[in-house]
Image (tube, grey):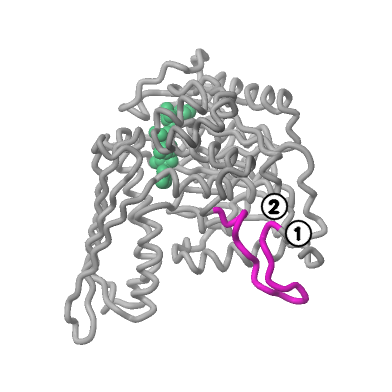
């Protein structure tokens, strides 16, 4: 990888452009996460529900220099919730209300109050290819047949949305399904090769890559909430550098992996050993249905498995972490809907090697955990763009299961290290005079 992949240095706070005007939020994939996110923002700005779980809305900056401890919202120039407008693409959902009703994450009484506004978020026809998501049958799809024409059609959609909503700036967050597993290939190595591949309809180019390409071409920051390769590709990193656009990914860190990155650093802090970690999940939403296909599950499994090794560093602690069996399973079980249950059987050992067991049973709500991450990523990716930063935004690792890193560095998975980096970066961009 070249220097192209690196993040540009953050400028001084005075160089961060003010968040004036409207910020358009474009969401490929108007499913459970996206509709829950939009509904929560609408509820928060109507004063109906607080934005629980959002660092940007509720978090605080530590005291530093002459500035005392203060809310992130008071110190850092973030776009206001009132200034967000939403758009998206989906091959199945017609609009935000239909997506939320199908997802059954939120109660009817919570949807009733914002139903008109949710319904107004009409999904654009998707670039969709069933070969990448076998369990879904999309019918609201673009008619362009070549991948190049599909990319151009997405750029047109973006520009139409920008003009229709009088957007000052845009951000795109991939909330679409997890695609079948894929390794990068020749077509992903450079922008030129990727563009040739689009024109030649290369089989290695997936729909999420076409959205990422269109976003970057249109100068729109792109964050990837799924484990698809999308911006984890040299061509996209080259394009992000060329177009001076921030990128981030991948795969929102929500239920089980969040727990893993909370517990594992604690075990390591106390020099307790780990012999095995068996994680299993049942969930019954559309995401669970997609992940029931082995090819799609493999993409998710790869992103989930990377976490333990980098936290525990078996190379430095062979007697504690040299032999770990780490298994992750996801089973589709319709009765649960979005209310995923994740079990972790954790086999640890202590003084003189005596074994102990930890059991975690987390009955979570997947989209309730993911929605505030989408909001933070929207606001922080926009902040990065206004600060003139482009390429990989490593300071946003906090939000991802498989964080992107600037060339040559190992990903950090420890949630508290990630939080320190996030807050330190925000502190750099905060106005010391604002309180
Ligand atoms: N909910 C969580 O906690 C969580 C955590 C990490 C990652 N994710 C990932 O976030 C994504 C969204 O999760 P969800 O629960 O909302 O799933 P979902 O199935 O409810 O929504 C995904 C939507 O994407 C649409 N879609 C599929 N292919 C598309 C394409 N090519 N273009 C546009 N739309 C497309 C589907 O029709 C669906 O409506 C999934 O990839 C999931 O793995 C979710």
Identify residue for label 1: 11
* Label 1 residue SS: loop
Q: Are marks 1 and 2 in contact (CB under 8 Å)?
A: yes
* Residue in the image at 22% along x and 77% along y: 349
Residue 205 appearing in the image: no
Identify residue for label 2: 389
Residue 268 among magenta residues: no
* Residue in the image at 55% along x and 53% along y: 54
* Residue in the image at 27% along x and 61% along y: 360
118 relative to 108 in the view: left or right: right
53 relative to 6 in the view: left or right: left
How many neighbours does mark 2 have within 10 angstroms: few (below 14), some (14-19), or many (20 or more)?
many
111 relative to 120 in the view: left or right: left
Residue 403 lies, in percent from the top left, at 48, 54
Residue 63 among magenta residues: yes
Viewer-proximal residue among 158 and 5: 158
* Label 2 residue SS: loop
């Amino acid at each position: 990888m070249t220097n192209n992949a690196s993040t540009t240095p953050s400028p001084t706070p005075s160089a961060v452009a003010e968040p004036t005007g409207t910020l358009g939020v474009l969401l490929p994939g108007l499913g459970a996460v996206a509709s829950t996110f939009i509904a929560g923002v609408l509820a928060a700005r109507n004063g109906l529900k607080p934005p629980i779980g959002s660092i940007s809305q509720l978090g605080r900056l530590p005291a530093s220099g002459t500035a005392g401890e203060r809310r992130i919202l008071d110190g850092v120039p973030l776009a206001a919730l009132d200034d967000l407008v939403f758009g998206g693409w989906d091959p199945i959902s017609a609009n935000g209300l239909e997506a939320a009703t199908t997802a059954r994450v939120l109660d009817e009484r919570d949807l009733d109050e914002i139903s008109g506004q949710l319904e107004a978020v009409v999904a654009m026809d998707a670039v969709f290819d069933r070969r990448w998501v076998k369990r879904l049958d999309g019918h609201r799809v673009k008619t362009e047949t070549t991948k190049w024409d599909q990319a151009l059609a997405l750029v047109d959609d973006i520009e139409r949305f920008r003009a229709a909503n009088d957007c000052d700036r845009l951000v795109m967050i991939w909330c679409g399904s997890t695609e079948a597993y894929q390794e990068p290939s020749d077509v992903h190595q450079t922008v030129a090769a990727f563009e040739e591949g689009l024109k030649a309809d290369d089989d290695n180019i997936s729909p999420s890559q076409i959205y990422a390409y269109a976003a970057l071409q249109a100068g729109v920051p792109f964050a990837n909430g799924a484990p698809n390769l999308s911006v984890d590709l040299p061509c996209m990193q080259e394009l992000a550098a060329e177009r001076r656009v921030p990128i981030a990914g991948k795969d929102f860190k929500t239920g089980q992996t969040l727990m893993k990155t909370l517990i594992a650093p604690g075990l390591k802090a106390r020099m307790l050993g780990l012999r095995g970690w068996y994680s299993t999940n049942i969930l019954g939403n559309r995401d669970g249905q997609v992940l029931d296909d082995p090819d799609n599950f493999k993409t998710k499994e790869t992103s989930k498995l990377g976490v333990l090794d980098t936290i525990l560093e078996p190379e430095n602690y062979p007697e504690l972490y040299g032999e770990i069996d780490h298994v992750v399973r996801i089973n589709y079980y319709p009765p649960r809907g979005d209310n995923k249950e994740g079990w972790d059987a954790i086999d640890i050992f202590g003084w003189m090697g005596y074994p102990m067991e930890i059991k975690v049973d987390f009955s979570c709500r997947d989209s309730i955990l993911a929605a505030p991450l989408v909001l933070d990523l929207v606001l922080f990716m926009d902040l990065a763009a206004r600060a003139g930063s482009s390429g990989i935004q490593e300071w946003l690792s906090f939000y991802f299961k498989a964080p992107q890193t600037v060339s040559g560095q190992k990903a950090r998975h420890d949630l508290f290290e990630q939080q320190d980096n996030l807050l330190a970066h925000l502190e750099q961009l905060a106005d010391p005079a604002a309180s």
